[in-house]
Image (cartoon, helix red, strand yellow):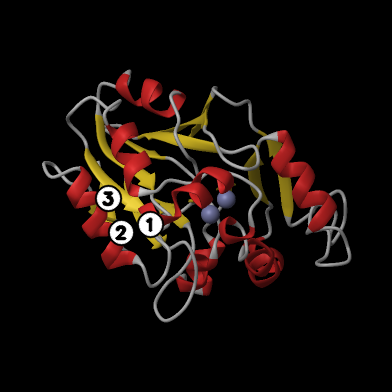
Amino acid sequence: MKVHILGASGGIGGSARTTSLLIDDDILIDAGTGVGELSLAAMQCVDHVFLTHSHLDHLACLPFMMDSVGAARGRPVTVHAQPATLEGLKAHLFNGVLWPDFASVPTPQAPFMLYETLNVGAECKIGARRLRSIPVNHAVPTVGYLIRGSTGSIAFSGDTTTTDEYWRVLNACDDLKHVIIELSFLDKDEQLARISRHMCPRLLAEDLKKLKAGPQVHLTHLMPGAEDELMTEIARHVPRNTPRRLMRGDILEC
Ligand SMILES: [Zn+2]
Ligand SMILES: [Zn+2]
């Protein structure tokens, strides 16, 4: 299994792209502005999109992708998300005002897109890959994912502040190779991190104590412009086995 990092920033500007991960060539986790890095041919291969939550930085390119490849694909893209996220998409995005309702366009019988409700905590099998959604702790209902390939697993937190369930599920996984966790705000903005339910280095360092040693830890969703300072702060809190910064273009394999 290969996970190609298309976007790993908390915002845009210069080379920064927002959250999107491509699993092999057919599954996207989130559809932030990183999706714009894919060629048209690569976009056409995406059969499944698993969303973590409804915030725009995680799905901004989903409407454009559907518009660009919907007609050429000849079969729908399945969008998997928990009920609150799907309701948000239907009411506020694919609502015929901001963008066409691609779940009924061009016809309700053969639409460009299908909605599939995630059973949070359950596992969804796509070919040889199994994706388990894990509830995390963010400003809107959000899940992370444990993605299991045939020879190892990769975990992605989505957006979250302090969480227990994510680490509990990860600690029970016996072939975990890579852990991706968000880090958004500097320690001076801890109050903002708490209110918006993101991580700052101090909160993350406390949370990382819940993870059993073993997997490589990667940091994502860093605020644009604050990346170097965030990495300095986390290195101060976690001087040994300091997590690395996840970069756009990285490929994690297992
Ligand atoms: Zn968010
Ligand atoms: Zn976000």
Tag 3's secondary structure? Answer: strand
Kindly identify which numbered label has been placed on residue 230.
2
Is residue 115 left or right of 188 when viewed as pictured?
Answer: right
Residues tagged 1 and 2 counted as in contact (Cβ below 8 A): yes
Residue shown at 44%/34% (left/top)? 162
Residue kind at label 1, given as amino acid type = Leu
Q: Which residue is the site of mark 1?
A: 186
Which corner quadrant holds the N terminus?
top left
Q: Which of marks 3 and 2 is nearer the N terminus?
A: 2
Q: Which residue is the site of mark 3?
A: 252
Is residue 57 left or right of 156 when viewed as pictured?
Answer: right
- Which class describes the residues within 10 Å of circle 3: few (<14), some (14-19), or many (20+)? some
Residue kind at label 2, given as amino acid type = Leu
Residue shown at 33%/48% (left/top)? 201
Residue shown at 17%/46% (left/top)? 242
Name the one closer to the observer, 170 or 196: 196
Is residue 157 left or right of 143 when viewed as pictured?
Answer: left
Q: Is residue 54 positioned above or below 224 on the image?
A: above
Q: Is residue 64 positioned above or below 145 on the image?
A: below
Q: Which of marks 1 and 2 is nearer the N terminus?
A: 1
Q: Where is residue 34 in the image (x, y as percent from the top left)?
A: 48, 66
Tag 1's secondary structure? Answer: loop
Residue shown at 69%/64% (left/top)? 63
Q: Is residue 163 positioned above or below 204 on the image?
A: above
Q: What is the CA distance from the residue labelled 3 to the residue labelled 2?
A: 22 Å
Q: Does the residue tagged 1 have its C-beta within 8 Å of any atom of ligand 2?
A: no
Name the one closer to the observer, 72 or 192: 192
